[in-house]
Amino acid sequence: MAYRRTPAVQARLDAQRETVLQSAVLLLADRGYGGCTMAAVADRAGIATGSLYQHFANKAELSVELFRRVVNREIAAVHEALARQDTPQRRVAAVVETFAARALRVPRLAYALLVEPADAVVDGERLVFRRAFRDVIATEIAAALAAGELPEQDPVLTAAALVGAVGEALAGPLADPTDRAASEVVPALVSFTLRALGGRDDSDA
């Protein structure tokens, strides 16, 4: 007869898995992807390395779950920012501003998520992440076009270009947070976004 976990055992395992993921997020923010080994995560979580393998078969599997957790948190933050804006252009700018500002507040974590060399499965998750942000932006551009508020353009293409530009602009400051120019990145990206959409930035008045 196959063994079935009791509810108490399953609850304990679920709680331990949550502890592992929380510990992995903290470790990723502290040491980056390279320092987020199975042994290091287990040590941070206060469990034996063998126990960690009850939840994740290898580092790649753990990394994917870790990546998804942090990314979903960032997407939720972007949607909250969207709700506070009243025009499509400003909603798109809010996506860029929120994402960039949050990344610069935790540069080591953001660098690990966006730039640091990682396993192929993580690179695949990065592509999903970029597409998710692209789709959020494309939806807002499409709404602005429907309202006649922006010049004619391909919403998906513009959105993809914006996501790529934001990632490239952040790469340097995330790698070197002490760079004084890092403080200028967010407002510059907001201005760039509004102009790229075909609208006007406040400084253009």
Image (tube, grey):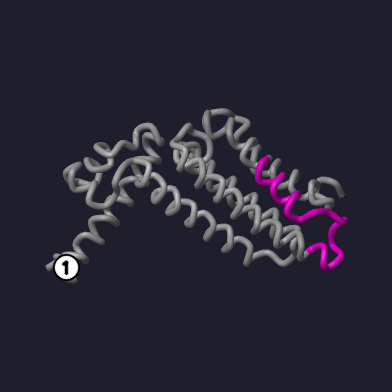
In magenta, the rendered stretch is 144-164
Name which residue lies at 79% across and 63% down.
144
| Looking at the image, residue 178 lies above or below residue 46 | above
Q: Which residue carries the number 1 mark?
A: 4
Residue 161 position, x and y percent, is 72, 44
| 203 is higher (above) or lower (below) than 88 | above
Q: In the rendered structure, which amino acid carries the disc numbered 1?
A: Arg
Could you tell me residue 67's position as x and y percent? 44, 48
Q: Position of residue 138 (x, y in %)?
A: 71, 57
| Residue at 64%, 43% in the rendered image | 186
Disc 1 residue crowd, few under 14, some 14–19, many 20+, Cα 10 Å: few
Query: Residue 121, position in %: x, y?
Result: 45, 42
* In-front residue for pair 153/198: 153
| Quarter of the rendering containing residue 147 | bottom right
- Residue lying furthest left: 1
- As for residue 146 lying within the magenta part, the answer is yes
Q: Quadrant of the N terminus?
A: bottom left
Residue for point 22% across, 51% down: 54
